[in-house]
Amino acid sequence: MTRMTTIGLIGRSSRPGETLPANLLEAAEAVGKAVAKAGAALVTGGTGGVMEASSRGAKTAGGLTVGFLPYGDADKANGYCDLVFPTGMGTIRNILTARCCHSLIMLGGGVGTLNELTVAYDAGVPVVALEGCGGWSDRLRETLYDGCYLDERRVLPVSFAATPEEAVEIALSRADEPRTGSKLEALTGWAGG
Amino acid sequence: MTRMTTIGLIGRSSRPGETLPANLLEAAEAVGKAVAKAGAALVTGGTGGVMEASSRGAKTAGGLTVGFLPYGDADKANGYCDLVFPTGMGTIRNILTARCCHSLIMLGGGVGTLNELTVAYDAGVPVVALEGCGGWSDRLRETLYDGCYLDERRVLPVSFAATPEEAVEIALSRADEPRTGSKLEALTGWAGG
Amino acid sequence: MTRMTTIGLIGRSSRPGETLPANLLEAAEAVGKAVAKAGAALVTGGTGGVMEASSRGAKTAGGLTVGFLPYGDADKANGYCDLVFPTGMGTIRNILTARCCHSLIMLGGGVGTLNELTVAYDAGVPVVALEGCGGWSDRLRETLYDGCYLDERRVLPVSFAATPEEAVEIALSRADEPRTGSKLEALTGWAGG
Amino acid sequence: MTRMTTIGLIGRSSRPGETLPANLLEAAEAVGKAVAKAGAALVTGGTGGVMEASSRGAKTAGGLTVGFLPYGDADKANGYCDLVFPTGMGTIRNILTARCCHSLIMLGGGVGTLNELTVAYDAGVPVVALEGCGGWSDRLRETLYDGCYLDERRVLPVSFAATPEEAVEIALSRADEPRTGSKLEALTGWAGG
């Protein structure tokens, strides 16, 4: 068996010409390094912001990086992805980044990241929010049910971390959790709401 | 031109054997009636809970109802949909309910509804939350940016309503807003395929 | 129960500035009329060519028309759709036109139509090819297994018709066939999401 | 830049309990080996049949293998995938295998493989059919326009190969062709037909 553990990173992208806060990019790069050192593959949306920074970090540590682009044009990927998949699916590709990894780490982020969080929760993929990065990852404690659940079923808690290394450690420790979301769907034929 | 206005209803579904609160179902039914009386088509996920109640309301008022099922089997639709589309897409069908209508009304709801809210916001589709229904529609005021935005860009405010009739009135008034989200897509180079 | 039968029309679209053969457009319009007269809803991709012509035919006969656009912009629909769904999914929307109807009618068509035919066959949706329209609908007899199957399993024959009225008659008669494709999915463990 | 070339393999899968012809599996394994020796990544649907055989071949030659499952359950992947993505998208995942690689090799195949061929053609991804494997890859010469095109536009020829090594050689030589399909869409706003 050759199967690798896949850790997804979701969070704040950058628009053309925009520079993100240095501490956010440093955190993303440190996450990428720690994922690579653990021997796991890093999966991102393949574009800029925390996705580029984390991929750069993973590559400097000799890791493997994957980018699922919303675009159909592979040339729009950042320069640190070993495998680029130009899905051409627009925001539907969030399904891939959020549902196909063993676990996810969330750094900052706007509505697209919140979307990925809901997809992950629904599919039973554990998410670790790295706090201190701004955006939605800093707002989850105060907005979720009991500070960690996305709905009243309370099936899958969001974890919180204070450092990039801690975030990766938790993400790896939760990588093999059974998929509560998928099981629920299979058992009940229930798909959302 | 024969084009109809489409109003989507998102919110709490029901699991097999579960009974939802009477006030929630009454609100959903009243929304469906008001949509039908206005001559608009009602679009839902086609299954139970608020989706069934609102479709029943629309049919009693002579309206047209559409259901986009997550399942591939049309027999799983409720009995009040004129047009049933068994997408077989699982949660990807949330893209259809949330992105393809002129505007949306939100009644209660868990993580699936929150997912649809993020999809709508990203695509520039206006959402009206009917308060007093429990679930996420009652939590938005306290959790969103400035009480109405899903991210820091603050491009598309969520509206709030106190009665089903007011919700429909606002949804209709916002039905022809230009799609701010789509504009953003155009700027960033994504062509929807 | 208010459920309508849905007949999808797939086939040759038109590029900007292109005029399609008159006999092809007339056949499409006649299909739309016959679908409407039978009380069924007509479902198309919502753009030009045979999709526009068939929708026009359905509207002149008082029918209901639905268009699933590949674009996210509803303004790109033709003027004869009652319900326009701007999916923004690009070619993924072929899943909707091809998998969500009770049966399909195929008029001419290039690679996109051939794609829809494969999707329909895989999902167990019956297809009727109207011959004499050019494109792939005229090539199926000589290219398919036994002149009517898309693979060696031979589970779902393509039907052939010589006139628009016959095509609609066959499509309606096959509308309630059990979904052999979906059954296969059930056996192989895929639950549609 | 760390970007790898990605070669997709599409073709005949196997149903539970079914044994495929030895020559087909040997060809698939040889394709995987040749892809790996060339330093490219092998992308498949991650399940059985030619997908498993080619992945095994790539791993014995030290290559990198990726599997995009139709299922949401990663345990359904074959044992030779380094990276498994359990998309849970059903047949929509054909978009990934067919549209996201630099080029594709086709070995045998039924309706699902024909579907992937249409997706690839539409997106401008070159396909090489290895002849002598049965199924659709042996039927293309006699069924396509001019023996190599999927529609009358004749924009992207299917290539043919007589041996696994030749197939890989052609696939690599065509890996950097400009995406005619995507360009066409961008220029004309035309999306199918």
Image (cartoon, coloured by chain):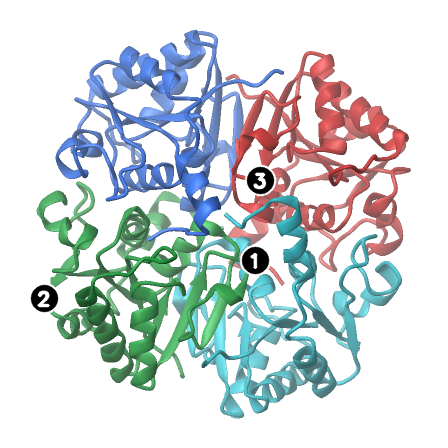
Chain colours: A blue, B green, C cyan, D red
Q: Which mark is residue D112?
A: none
Residue linked to disc 2:
B162
Q: Chain of mark 1?
A: C
Label 2 crowd bin: few (<14), some (14–19), many (20+), radius 10 Å: few
Q: Amino acid at mark 2?
A: Ala
Q: Secondary structure at mark 1?
A: helix
The residue positioned 47% from the left and 54% from the top of the image is C89
Q: State the image coordinates of residue C159 (x, y, percent, origin top left).
A: 78, 73
Label 3 to label 1: alpha-carbon separation: 14 Å
Q: State the image coordinates of residue B119 (x, y, percent, origin top left).
A: 32, 50
Label 1 crowd bin: few (<14), some (14–19), many (20+), radius 10 Å: many
Q: Is residue B150 above or below residue C181?
A: above
Q: Which mark is residue C95?
A: 1
| Quadrant where the N terminus of chain C is found in the figure | bottom left
Label 3 crowd bin: few (<14), some (14–19), many (20+), radius 10 Å: many
Label 2 to label 1: alpha-carbon separation: 38 Å
The residue positioned 41% from the left and 59% from the top of the image is B96
Q: Amino acid at mark 3?
A: Leu
The residue positioned 35% from the left and 20% from the top of the image is A171
Q: Is residue A192 above or below residue D17?
A: below
Q: Chain of mark 2?
A: B
Label 2 to label 3: alpha-carbon separation: 44 Å
Please tell me if label 2 and label 1 are on a single chain.
no
Residue linked to disc 3:
D96
Q: State the image coordinates of residue D169 (x, y, percent, origin top left).
A: 78, 25
